[in-house]
Image (spheres, helix red, strand yellow):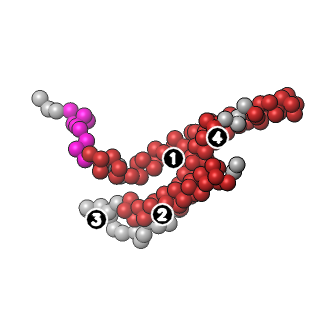
């Protein structure tokens, strides 16, 4: 009887989780890019609905907007900002990669094949550091300067 290989335990531990295991950290970036895209779409639809409530007049609009002045809502806005920053900057990286930038010179497909992932990883690291800097600066503006 043969074992089912789909259910082996992850023997890489924390290192495997942080580096993406056998898939690489790019797999997490791919998943996060999809999730942030869907989250921004949901936010956009909610934003259109809220903006459409202006039809109730200035007093109704002001009362409606005062309900959004809670700390929980401000944190939600910051989460939307984080999603936007990551999605936009990672999207630029993906566009440059799709256009063939930062992939290096093409080589002959000789076994063992060389993956282009390692050629893209420095750009990925730069983009993630840039996104983190934008998020930190946005957090400073959101919570310290935006009072």
Q: Which residue is mark 1?
A: 33
Asked if residue 91 can be seen in this view, the reply is no
Badge 1 element: helix
The mark closer to the camera, 1 or 4, is 4
Q: Which residue is mark 4?
A: 74
Q: Which residue is mark 3?
A: 110
> Which is nearer the eye, 145 or 19?
145
Q: Quarter of the image containing the N terminus?
A: top left
How crowded pointer 4 is (Cα within 10 Å; few <14, some 14-19, many 20+) is rated as some
- For marks 2 and 3, give the CA distance: 30 Å
The mark closer to the camera, 3 or 1, is 1
- For marks 4 and 3, give the CA distance: 54 Å
The mark closer to the camera, 2 or 3, is 2
Mark positioned earlier in the residue sequence (2 or 3): 3
Give residue 126's position: percent from left, percent from top: 48, 63
> Which is nearer the eye, 128 or 118?
128
- For marks 1 and 4, give the CA distance: 23 Å
- For marks 2 and 1, give the CA distance: 16 Å
In the image, what residue occupies the spot 82% across and 32% down?
A: 61
The mark closer to the camera, 4 or 3, is 4
Mark positioned earlier in the residue sequence (3 or 1): 1
Badge 2 element: helix
- The residue range painted magenta reads 4-12
Mark positioned earlier in the residue sequence (4 or 3): 4
Q: Which residue is mark 2?
A: 126
| Furthest residue toward left | 1
Mark positioned earlier in the residue sequence (4 or 2): 4
Q: Which quadrant of the structure image shows residue 91? A: bottom right
Give residue 104's position: percent from left, percent from top: 42, 69
């Amino acid at each position: 009887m043969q074992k089912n290989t789909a259910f082996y335990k992850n023997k890489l531990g924390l290192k495997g989780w942080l580096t993406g295991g056998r898939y690489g950290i790019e797999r997490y970036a791919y998943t996060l890019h999809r999730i942030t895209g869907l989250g921004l779409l949901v936010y956009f639809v909610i934003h259109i609905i809220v903006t459409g409530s202006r039809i109730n007049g200035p007093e109704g609009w002001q009362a409606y907007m005062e309900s959004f002045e809670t700390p929980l809502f401000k944190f939600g806005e910051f989460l939307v900002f984080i999603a936007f920053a990551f999605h936009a900057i990672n999207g630029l990286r993906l566009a440059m990669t799709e256009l063939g930038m930062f992939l290096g010179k093409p080589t002959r497909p000789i076994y063992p094949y060389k993956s282009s992932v390692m050629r893209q990883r420095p750009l990925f690291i730069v983009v993630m550091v840039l996104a983190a800097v934008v998020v930190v600066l946005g957090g400073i503006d959101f919570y310290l300067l935006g009072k």
